[in-house]
Image (tube, helix red, strand yellow):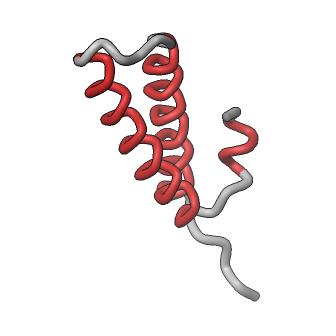
Amino acid sequence: MTAKEIRDLSPAEISAKLRELRESLLQSRLRKQTGQVEKTHELRSLRKDIARLETVLHQKQAQPAPAAA
C-alpha cells in the first residue's frame, strides 16, 4: 500500500485499516514463533504499512479542517 493510496482514504478508513493490519501482524508474529511462517518478509512489510498509515493519519489530524463557506 503506497502513501498516495493512503492519503485518498478518510481518517475512519485509515483507522479501520490500521486495526486490521495490527491484527494481521499479531497473527503473523504468533505463527512465526511456532515456526509456521514461510514468508518472513511479510512481517517487515506489515510494520512499514502500519507506519505509513499512522504517519498519514497524524498528518490529517494535525491539518486544520477546511472552513465551510
Name the foreground residue: 45 vs 56. 45
Q: Quadrant of the C terminus?
A: bottom right
Q: Is residue 33 above or below residue 12?
A: above
Name the foreground residue: 61 vs 18. 18
Q: Is residue 28 above or below residue 54?
A: above
Indicate the position of residue 15 as horizontal and vertical percent values. Answer: 47, 57
Q: Quadrant of the N terminus?
A: top right
- Rendered residue at 54%/34% (across/down): 52
Name the foreground residue: 38 vs 48. 38
- Rendered residue at 49%/59% (across/down): 16
Q: Quadrant of residue 43?
A: top left
- Rendered residue at 41%/16% (across/down): 37
Q: Is residue 17 above or below residue 4?
A: below
Taking 27 as reference, is 60 left or right?
A: right
- Rendered residue at 68%/48% (across/down): 7
Q: How many circles with numbers are drawn on the protein?
A: 0
Taking 1 as reference, is 39 left or right?
A: left
Indicate the position of residue 9 as horizontal and vertical percent values. Answer: 67, 57
Q: Quadrant of residue 2?
A: top right
Indicate the position of residue 22 as horizontal and vertical percent values. Answer: 38, 41
In this view, which residue lies farthest toward the bottom? 69
